[in-house]
């Protein structure tokens, strides 16, 4: 049973403070009143008490960290025997996301009004995903809501960690590309015109390479703003098209067909699918319902359709491994491990192993890609800058020779 710290006064008015074990707060208060104590306050012991932040700085959006912290702390409070309404009230005092705070306050009111926790969450489906809501539903039905919330937090933490590692690994190469493009642009737009004017004063015939570089510089200077506008317009139109149903399908299909990005996207989708489905199955969510929820975690329309086909085939009685093999999108290793999991009745655990395996593969793949990409960008930048420098200095040798000849 959980422990609570209470403050009360006895019949003589003496203050009594004690940490005591009880089923829940209500049971503790009833027991203290039966002893003739006047209860002043009941709360959690210091080691699990959530402190109120007087200097909170709010932000508008709901970040992954906000949801992870909310689910972890809610699981801790419920596991300590605090009622759901009291737990939500405590968390409202420390949530830093304005959007999440308003949602939790409304959820608290709905629960007080008779809603179940999962039905209260459904009213905020833009914040709480079907994955979250179904695990809460399973936890409420089984009486293990704290455990379900811990599973939600674990899944969110793993997904966030994988995304963070991928983004962190790509930051340095992106910075290198930006620096390279900026350096080349400055050279063409600012430095080359200066040399061009110098060369005109000497009236010597310029080498072909120098003429090409000067022509490129002139075109960029003359049409730079137009070209920039065209690029911005193209980016806007492409993003607009991708936001449509047809555009998102074609874009997701293209991503899977690209030489390096394609395999990476498949492995990320496999990790998400296996992690989500494994968590749902272990929580007691029915297979078909778990597959339906897992479709939406793939992050790719093509893979999402393949998983939908898997669900429909499983509904007709076919083994999940066989149908996944027929889609052609999943590796033989995944199919084989899921097949073994089905045969031995440990599909949830086997999916966890698949998720762990592919998470490690994605991390390794991204690390290697970054390691290879950095020297390629540096070499490319060195070659381009070298060509520009040589193109600008070649006429200087011609001018020097002409001056010597005339002298």
Image (cartoon, rainbow, N blue to C red):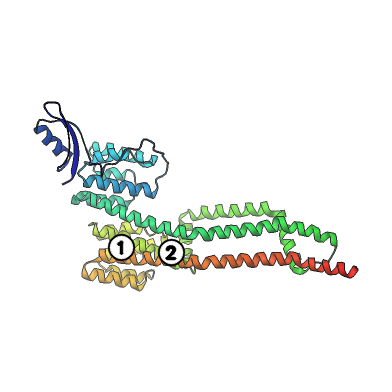
Residue 136: % across, % down = 26, 49
Q: Mark 1 packing: few (<14 Cα in 10 Å), some, or many (20+)? A: many
What is the CA distance from the residue labelled 2 to the residue labelled 1?
21 Å
Mark sitting on residue 265: 2
Q: In which quadrant of the rendered view does residue 100 lie?
A: top left
> Which residue is rendered at x = 88% and y = 70% of the image?
405
Query: Which of 156 and 233 lies nearest the eye of the viewer?
Result: 156
The image shows residue 208, relative to residue 160, as above or below, that is below
Residue 86 x, y percent position in the rendering: 24, 38
Whether residue 223 is visible: yes
Residue 135, percent across and down? Answer: 26, 52
Q: How crowded is mark 2: few (under 14 residues within 10 Å), some or many (20 or more)?
A: many
Q: Mark 1 points at which residue?
A: 311
User: SS for tag 1?
Assistant: helix
Question: Who comes first in sequence, dot 2 or dot 1?
Answer: 2
Front-most of 55 and 145?
A: 55
Helix, strand, or loop for circle 2?
A: helix
């Amino acid at each position: 049973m959980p422990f609570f710290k209470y403050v009360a006064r006895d019949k003589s008015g003496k203050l009594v403070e004690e940490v005591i074990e009880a089923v829940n707060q209500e049971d503790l208060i009833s027991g203290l009143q039966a002893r003739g104590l006047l209860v002043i306050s009941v709360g959690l012991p210091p080691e699990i008490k959530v402190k109120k932040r007087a200097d909170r700085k709010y932000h508008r959006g709901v970040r992954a960290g906000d949801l992870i912290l909310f689910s972890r702390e809610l699981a801790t409070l419920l596991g300590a025997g605090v009622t759901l309404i009291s737990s939500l009230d405590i968390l409202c005092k420390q949530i830093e996301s304005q959007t999440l705070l308003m949602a939790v306050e409304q959820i608290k009111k709905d629960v007080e009004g008779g809603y179940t926790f999962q039905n209260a969450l459904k009213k905020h489906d833009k914040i709480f995903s079907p994955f979250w809501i179904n695990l809460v539903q399973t936890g409420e039905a089984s009486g293990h809501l704290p455990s379900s919330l811990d599973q939600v937090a674990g899944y969110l933490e793993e997904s966030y960690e994988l995304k963070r590692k991928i983004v962190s690994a790509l930051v340095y190469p992106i910075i290198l590309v930006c620096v390279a493009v900026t350096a080349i642009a400055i050279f063409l737009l600012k430095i080359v015109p200066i040399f061009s004017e110098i060369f005109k004063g000497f009236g010597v015939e310029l080498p072909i390479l120098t003429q090409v570089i000067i022509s490129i510089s002139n075109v960029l200077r003359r049409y730079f703003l137009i070209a920039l506008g065209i690029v911005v317009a193209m980016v806007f139109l492409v993003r607009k098209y991708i936001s449509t149903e047809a555009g998102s399908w074609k874009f997701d299909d293209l991503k899977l067909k690209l030489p390096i990005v394609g395999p990476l996207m498949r492995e990320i989708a496999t990790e998400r699918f296996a992690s989500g489905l494994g968590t749902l199955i272990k929580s007691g969510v029915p297979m078909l319902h778990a597959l339906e929820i897992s479709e939406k975690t793939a992050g790719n329309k093509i893979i999402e359709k393949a998983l939908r086909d898997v669900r429909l085939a499983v509904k007709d009685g076919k083994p999940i491994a066989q149908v996944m093999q027929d889609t052609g999108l999943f590796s033989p290793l995944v199919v084989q491990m899921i097949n073994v999991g089905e045969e031995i009745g440990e599909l949830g655990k086997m999916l966890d192993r698949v998720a762990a395996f592919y998470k490690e593969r994605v991390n390794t793949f991204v690390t290697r890609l970054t390691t290879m990409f950095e020297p390629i960008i540096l070499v490319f930048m060195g070659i381009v800058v070298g060509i520009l420098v040589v193109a600008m200095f070649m006429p200087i040798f011609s001018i020097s020779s002409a001056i010597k000849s005339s002298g």
